[in-house]
């Protein structure tokens, strides 16, 4: 059974624009989350430079003892970071689906300003439905 | 330098520009995402030029009005063989089924008569296509971007000879997080009087 802990969306300048925790254990304070997001943003950029192979775009997955972290980099520079339980399958597909939901319910919303925190009820609703159907 | 006609899409097989194509060509479908972005920009454009929520709804209605007048002409030619609706129920059914099917791909959910007043009718839709990707923030109150569709309905009714006042409302529905959108049409006394006369003859 897949357990998804949290989703974080980082805009192209490294600022946190969306954060959602799906379990009690993963609850993180907003300020802390913003710091973590900018740290991840820098790590991601550095890893792309460090890689010996040309054309690499940065960390896609991080495996730890108690969690896995998947990161999807959109062509526009927006990063979707998903933390889940170890050995969970299908996270890349889920990230793609979340990217589609983002491009539908956030980008097509006339009241959303680019690179600003996401406050779209439709996006929250559909995201919750998607996560619930996976776990 | 070759000047390409901007009205000729990349997918067009013939060398005819868009405005010269015959009208009764089977209708082509437009990508929903393309329309969603265009509509989003329309709302943002209007938002920059108004100072209140009601004004924004009014603006969207005005734009819809212009679409409505043209939609009536086109659909009368294409779908109904140039027959004109003279009865109230006729034009309401036309709007409720044909117009909705052409614009949104399926007929509207319901057409009701107002309980309190004889001259009020309502068309409801569980989720208007234009509103699908829009989440209105709290500080905009009761703004409904479906007023664009209300404008379309008003344009059709006015051009067909049934002047009315049209407004958009949210109606909360049990068991559903998003409220239903209802378009309320209040016809002028002249229309009701004419209906009475025609009904008796």
Image (cartoon, rainbow, N blue to C red):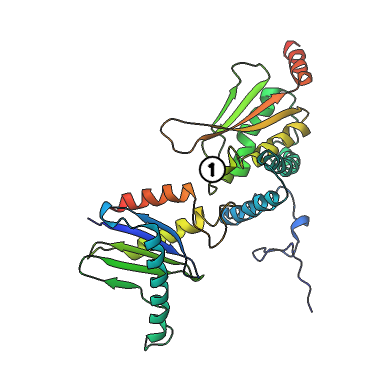
Left or right, B58 with reference to A43: right
- Which residue: 41% across, 64% down? A34
Residue B105 in sight? no
Q: Does residue B163 appear to the left or right of A31 in the view shown? A: right
As drawn, which residue projects farthest toward the left? A65
User: Height in image: B147 above or below B49?
Assistant: above
Front position in the image: B160 or A120: A120
Q: Chain of mark 1?
A: B
Assign the C terminus of chain B to one quadrant of the image: top right
Residue placed at 61% from the left, 27% from the top?
B122
Residue B73 location, quadrant: top right
Residue farthest along the top direction in this orientation: B200
Residue that appears at 35% across and 73% down: A60
Up-down: is A26 above or below B143?
Answer: below
Where does residue B100 sit, x and y in percent of width and height? 61, 38
Q: Secondary structure at mark 1?
A: helix
Percent position (x, y) of residue B40? 62, 52
- Residue at the spot of label 1: B138
**Rendered-image quadrant of the N terminus of chain B:** bottom right
Q: Position of residue B165 (x, y in %)?
A: 72, 28
In-front residue for pair B87/A63: A63
Label 1: few (<14), some (14–19) or many (≥20) C-alpha neighbours in 10 Å: few
Q: State whether residue A129 is above or below residue B94.
A: below
Along the line of sight, which residue is nearer the eye, B26 or B159? B159
Residue B11: image location, x then y, percent: 64, 64
Q: For the view shown, which residue lies furthest in the bottom direction?
A: A52
Residue B43 visible to the viewer: yes
A60 lies left or right of B149: left
């Amino acid at each position: 059974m897949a357990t998804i802990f949290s989703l974080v969306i980082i805009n192209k300048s490294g600022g946190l624009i969306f954060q959602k925790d799906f379990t009690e254990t993963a609850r993180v304070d907003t300020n802390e989350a913003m710091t973590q997001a900018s740290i991840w943003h820098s790590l991601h950029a550095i890893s792309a430079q460090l890689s010996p192979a040309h054309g690499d775009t940065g960390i896609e997955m991080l495996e730890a003892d108690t969690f896995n972290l998947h990161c999807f980099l959109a062509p526009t520079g927006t990063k979707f970071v998903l933390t889940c339980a170890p050995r969970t399958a299908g996270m890349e597909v889920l990230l793609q689906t979340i990217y589609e939901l983002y491009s539908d319910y956030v980008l097509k919303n006339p009241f959303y300003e680019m690179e600003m925190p996401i406050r779209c009820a439709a996006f929250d609703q559909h995201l919750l439905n998607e996560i619930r159907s996976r776990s | 330098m070759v000047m390409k006609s901007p009205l000729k899409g990349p997918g067009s097989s013939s060398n005819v520009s868009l405005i010269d194509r015959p009208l009764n060509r089977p209708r082509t479908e437009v990508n929903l995402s393309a329309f969603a972005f265009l509509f989003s920009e329309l709302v943002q454009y209007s938002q920059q030029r108004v100072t209140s929520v009601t004004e924004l709804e009014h603006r969207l209605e005005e734009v819809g009005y212009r679409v409505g007048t043209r939609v009536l002409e086109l659909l009368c030619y294409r779908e109904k063989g140039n027959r004109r609706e003279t009865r109230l129920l006729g034009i309401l059914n036309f709007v409720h089924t044909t117009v909705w099917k052409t614009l949104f791909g399926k007929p509207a959910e319901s057409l009701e008569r107002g309980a309190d007043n004889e001259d009020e009718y309502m068309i409801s839709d569980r989720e208007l296509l234009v509103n699908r990707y829009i989440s209105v923030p709290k500080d905009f109150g009761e703004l409904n971007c479906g007023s664009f569709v209300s404008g379309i309905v008003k344009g059709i009714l006015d051009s067909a000879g049934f002047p009315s006042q049209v407004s958009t409302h949210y109606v909360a529905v049990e068991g559903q997080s998003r409220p239903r959108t209802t378009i309320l049409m209040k016809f002028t006394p002249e229309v009701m009087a004419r209906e009475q006369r025609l009904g008796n003859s």
